[in-house]
Every structure is written in C-alpha cells, then in structure tokens.
Amino acid sequence: MKINTQLLLILILLPVISISQQNLYRVFFTDKNNCTFNPYNYFDHKAIERRIKNNINLYDSSDFPVNENYINKVKEYSDSLISINRWFNYICITTDNQKINDISQLPFVKNIEALTLKGNLCSNDNINEDTITILTNDVKNLLIKQTEILEGKLFDSAGYDGKGIRIAIFDAGFPTVNISNAFKKIRDEGRIIKTWDFAKNKEFVYGYSSHGLMVMSCIAGIYQGQKIGLATGAEFLLARTEVNGEPYFEEENWLQAVEWADKNGADIINSSLGYTYQRYFNYDMNGKTSLVAKAANLAAKKGILVVNAAGNEGDSKWKVIGTPADADSVLSIGGIDPETYYHIYFSSYGPTSDGRTKPNVCAFGEVAAITKKDEIKKVQGTSFSSPLIAGFAACAWQANPQLNNMELFKEIEKSAHLYPYFDYAHGYGIPKASYFLNKKKSNKPTFEFIKKVDEIIIKIYPEYLIDNSLPNLLYCNIQNETGKIELYKVIQVEQEEVSKIIINNNLKNKIINAHYKGYTNSIKIN
C-alpha cells in the first residue's frame, strides 16, 4: 500500500503561529459495512428540512458513521485518535512508522496519508488590537460604507435581516461574543444555537483569538445602532477550528466542523481561512486536490452555501487564491479598497489552476469591526470581505427562499456591479441588494468601441463623465478563444477617449470586454 507523505499547513487569513508535529496519519477505510444510521436522531430539524427541500437522500452513505470495529482495531496501533471523518470514511491518528505499516496491512484499510507538519501560519499584524487604528471619523464613515456599498439599506427597508437563516462561522475564537453589546439582541433571542471548540473538544468558544469576533461582527454586529454586517437577524453556529501556539490539526478541525455545521442545520458557512504554499503548490489550486475543497463541494451538494475568503497573498510570491476558495461550488470573496473601489493590494488573485473564474465576487478588504473592548476599529483582510458577503447572502436568501444554495450562488454573481464582465482580481464585482428586490440592472450604453484599421478605441459618452454616482473606472480585459483572460486592467477615466488598443497578430480572434458604470460590451478582433 502506498503512503503519500505531504506537508500540511493551514493559513488563517490573519494570525502568526509556529508549529511542529510528526507522525500524523489519515487512515481511510474501504467501506461502512454493518453501520446503522437514523437521520432523524442524528440531524437537527433544519438539516432535515434542507435535505427535503433540495431532494437530498436522508440516507446518503456519506453521513453514515465510520465502522466502530475498524476504528477500535486501528486504535490498537495508535498513540492517539485525533478525529473521525464520516464524509470521507477515515480517522486521523498519531502513531509511529512501524505501527502504521502494520495498519496498512489490515484488510479494511483502503489507503493512508501521512501528514508531516512543519511551517508557520502567516498573517497580517492587524489582528493585534493594540495596532488597530483607533476610532476616528474615517472609521465611522467606513462602518457606514461597508454595508452601503452592498445597498444594505434596501434590505433594511424591505425588512430583510437574515431571519431564519442559520450561519456557521469557522474561526480561531469568539472572545466577548457572549457579553458584547454588538451581539446582545442575538443572545437575548437565543440565536446562538450551538458552539464547539474542535481544538479542545468542548463547547466553550468565547476566548482565544479575536479574529472570529471581528468576523462575526461583519456578519451580524451592531454598533451604536449602526449595522456592521447585514444579517443581524440570523441564527449562528460558532466553531473554533484554529489554534494559536499549540500542536496544530487545523485542517482536521475544519473537516470536522463542516460535518458538524451540516448536522446542526447550517444554511451558510463562512470560512475566513485558507491553505496555501506550506501545504500545496499553485497547480494544486484546482478545486479537486485538497480534502477541504472536496469537503466544501460536498457541503454544497448537501444544500449549504459555502462562502470563503480568497486570501491575502496578492502581494506575495504565492499570489493566487488558497483552498477551499478554489472549490467550484464555493463562493470565493476577494477584497477591494474602500478608497479606490478596485482591488486592494493584498487580495489574492484568480483564476484557479484549471482556469475557472475566481474570486466570484468581492467586498471591502478594509473594514470597521468590533473589538474585545466593544470598540469599532479598522482591520484589513479578505477574512472580513467574506463575512460581509455571508451576511448579504443571508438577506438575499431570506428575500428569495425559493432558491437553492447554488441558484443563490449564481444570483449573487449576477447581482454584482460588473456582471457579466469579470476579471481575476474582482470576479463579477460587488453584489447589490437591488437586484434581489427588483431583478433590474441598468444596461444603458455608457461607451462604444470605435474600430479602425489598426486599432480599437474605447470612447466614453460625455454625459457619463460628469455622473459621480459611481467611481469613474473603466474595466477592460482581453479574452482568448477558450474563455481565459490573458490581460486585464482598471483605468481611471478622465476624458472621452479612454484607451487605444493596437491590433496585431497576437490579438487575432480574441475578444475585448469592457465595463463602465453598469454597462458591459464586447468586440471580437478579426
């Protein structure tokens, strides 16, 4: 039996940790023979409802328990049992090389993965509250803008606040969520349904890193009457999956948490986490290689909308999105600068290694979030772009309950301000609440292509140059015959004639796409 040795590391998109751990293995089993399963005893009623709504088999074998006899036999050769995974039918253990060879000979063992753990968790120092910008007028303005850019007031006016939607948050801790004024209404109404610390195997999650506190505030927090995030009426499942300064099994924790979230009736998962260069190569970011990407896709098949941060590697050697943001059925969220309204420098880029569009949409990558001192301060990271969209998604789903998760996924893309234009920095752009309330988007021409013998000119219509309702930005890309973007840029518009594209042999049969103030058009170069 072949044992695949890999380097394992999870990258939370903000704090720094060093780790060292040896002899960790995933032992996969051949079957689930002789396992009994009663979905009505196992699942929360909301998980049952979700399966019925989506015509999902209540007796899917992926939900069956792992064979206890197999577990007990492998435990005889193990130092410790770390986790049990139903969906992929394996257990994670620690043991030595000799014993793992003995385990590999057991007739019910399908294969084994050895996980050699070395490396560091990387981050942005803004997670340290002592370094976060103190509350000022610009932070107050940012607090308003981060939901205003999503047209959050339209959801408010229509009475949509995520009520009835259950959101699971996977993060590094939720200190003061149990006492903070930002979540008082959620606590008073009993809308924190369940909590679990997968690192310490207990219910208490209200300590440790403040990252999860800030993330939750960007979904559902309220500060002095102002919404920090949009889903203030939602229900919550809080899972601590990340560990600071302890032996690390974060990927295993994430895999356990996704099953737990499904079991306990999550409609949406927000995961501001990503696995990158210490674990994988760029070419592994194809949505099919990592187990967390496979698990995220499986969660989507079970009717859950999985929302994941794209990553903070845009200004590093890695550059591209991490996993599970690379998964096909994950709504991956990039970051934009709240001052310029285009890509913020650290936000990771698409596409996936197999050429799919990522990120899918974007939100502010610099936000105002709550701290342990119950103050609002400025923080950066796609870790916070993701929960803004998770809260938006909850409101959109409440407004359109007939949609399933993947229909909602596509509608969120269509609602974005650049759609159908896209690029690998912004995806389809910033989702807008108005789309979910009236399904109308402006498509009035704002520019035209002027084709000459050896060049194509993009000309802006004069009346739109003085329209200050939107940032004065032209988005433009060149797309090849396979649909992949070869070049894209954002241009600050200052005059009618914006861009001249010289036609040469390299551009033959390619398509120029452009977007300006709500209007997208294309031209093929013959």
Image: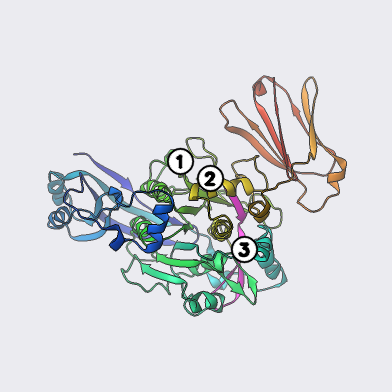
Question: Foreground: 10 or 193?
Answer: 193
Query: Does the magenta-highlighted stretch encompass residue 325?
Result: no
Q: Callout 2 environment at 10 Å: few (<14), some (14 to 19), or many (20+)?
A: some
Seen at 71% across and 53% down, the residue is 340
**Lower position in the chain sequence, tag 2 or tag 3:** 2
Q: Are marks 2 and 1 in contact (CB under 8 Å)?
A: yes
Label 2: element kind: loop
Q: For residue 392, which quarter of the picture?
A: bottom right
Seen at 31% across and 68% down, the residue is 201
- Type of amino acid under label 3: Val
Distance (Cα) linking label 2 and label 3: 22 Å
| Residue 167 spot, x, y in % from top left | 47, 62
**Lower position in the chain sequence, tag 1 or tag 3:** 1
Q: Callout 3 environment at 10 Å: few (<14), some (14 to 19), or many (20+)?
A: many
| Residue pointed to by mark 1 | 282
Tell me the number on the disc at residue 367: 3
Tell me the number on the disc at residue 142: none
| Residue 439 spot, x, y in % from top left | 66, 49
- Type of amino acid under label 2: Lys
Q: Callout 1 environment at 10 Å: few (<14), some (14 to 19), or many (20+)?
A: some
Give the mark toward the camera: 1 or 3.
3
Name the magenta segment's main secondary structure: strand
What is the quadrant of the N terminus in the image?
top left
Label 3: element kind: strand
For the image shown, how many numbered marks are present on the structure?
Answer: 3
| Residue pointed to by mark 2 | 319
Label 1: element kind: helix
Image: magenta residue range:
361-379
Q: For residue 217, which quarter of the picture?
A: bottom right
Residue 116 appears in view: yes
Seen at 79% across and 38% down, the residue is 445
Query: Does the magenta-highlighted stretch encompass residue 376?
Result: yes
